[in-house]
Image (cartoon, helix red, strand yellow):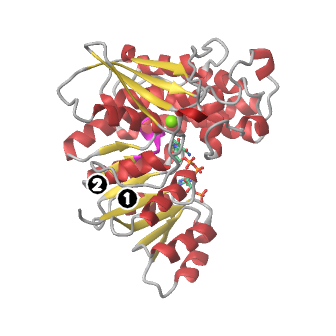
Amino acid sequence: SPLKRVTLLGSTGSIGTQALDVIRAHPGRFQVAALSAHANAELLIAQAREFRPAVVVIGDEAKHEAVKTALAGQGTEVLAGSAALTEVAGRPDTDIVLTAMVGYSGLLPTVAAIRAGKDIALANKETLVVAGQLITRLVKEHGVGLYPVDSEHSAIFQCLVGEERNPIEKIILTASGGPFRGRTAEQLASVTKAQALKHPNWDMGAKITIDSASLMNKGLEVIEAKWLFGLNDDQIDVVVHPQSIIHSLVQFQDGSLKAQLGLPDMKLPIQYALGYPERLPSDFPRFSFLDYPNLTFEQPDRATFRNLPLAFEAMRQGGNAPCVLNAANEIAVAAFLRDEIGFLEMPSLVESCLTKVSYLAEPSLDDYVLTDQETRRVAHELVGRR
Ligand code: NDP
Ligand code: MG
């Protein structure tokens, strides 16, 4: 099969560096067209020297000159700033854009890539949470592929191959439960960021690690699944499965359940999204039942981990409510990571923003941008007032 040219946005992060491991392992299959980082100029330079992309973007404009100087003479164009990221996402000389940046910053580059007819390998789930309706409409209009990288959604996507004519009855997203599974609200009130940053099964960026500890990650994934698979709100269930071996399940109308299993390793869903429809060979460690004699399942504690019901509620409201949920959560996580608010204040902040920011039933792209700004303003004010 032909060489796929990959634009990798957020190449210095957890997903970004693992994507480059996958690309490095398949030199005849993938070629890097563009790379981007936000602040980590050093790693971006090292990656650009190894993979020689046509263009790189450094988000932090103060580092523009340093990156330019370091890459002078190797034929790589060097740009800076968020507008450049959106411009590069829509460039012609690439086939697939892997969105591995964190948070709301993924929205405008993803829109630009779809409008330019690029397939999307989507790690940046926040984009589908913020504007799922708009993104899925654009994907249809432009006839591009939207391939999930998130492990749960990759599992469902893999289970649906060959089932195109069969309606989904429901999907079941598995959740590890995070480091605080089984804790009471009293215990959660005093947990520290160091405790929250220690995930039992996955080594990920700071924002998603906090989201996993608070179950907001599963809430975001519920909304992500709704849009990826065209589901109604009542077709999505969550079950806690602490071993993270079953990555998620689909139930069809005959009652049959299909699941995808494997060791927790993001390289597999990254490789599947980049290689689709092919399964490429890998030397990833293989699963053995001998190491996992007990796979267990339990209900999430929705009363203690309030982010999960809040996300379901925002999904049911629709419109700009999930955009509010996401922006409020980004401010909450950043404030928690600066020790400005406690663990349980994160869902409280999200809930307050959902009641304070005005509801829009049919937001345009500009409305999403404004809702994000307005929610950040409201959330900052609430954090400051405490
Ligand atoms: P990281 O924090 O490890 O990496 C984030 C990447 O985005 C870095 O390259 C970073 O650059 C860049 N970045 C940060 N802020 C901005 C910004 N404002 N604008 C543009 N780029 C920015 O995150 P992860 O790799 O863990 O997660 C990336 C996405 O993938 C998230 O949406 C997450 O939810 C999703 N995901 C991650 C999983 C994982 O296992 N890590 C699993 C499933 C989904 P720099 O390094 O210079 O700061
Ligand atoms: Mg996931």
Quadrant hosting residue 6 = bottom left
In the picture, the quarter occupied by the C terminus is top right
Residue farthest to the right, as pictured:
190
Residue 373, above or below 359: below
Residue 112, above or below 385: below
Residue for badge 2: 118
Task: Say what amino acid the circle numbered 2 marks.
Answer: Lys
Residue 153 rendering spot, x and y as whole percentages: 41, 34
Q: How many marks?
A: 2
In the depicted view, which residue is nearer to us: 208 or 324? 208
Q: How many neighbours does mark 1 have within 10 angstroms: few (below 14), some (14-19), or many (20 or more)?
A: many
Classify mark 2: helix, strand or loop.
loop
Question: Which residue is at a point 48% across and 88% down the rendered structure image?
Answer: 73
Residue for badge 1: 89
Quadrant hosting residue 52 = bottom left
Residue 141 rendering spot, x and y as whole percentages: 20, 42
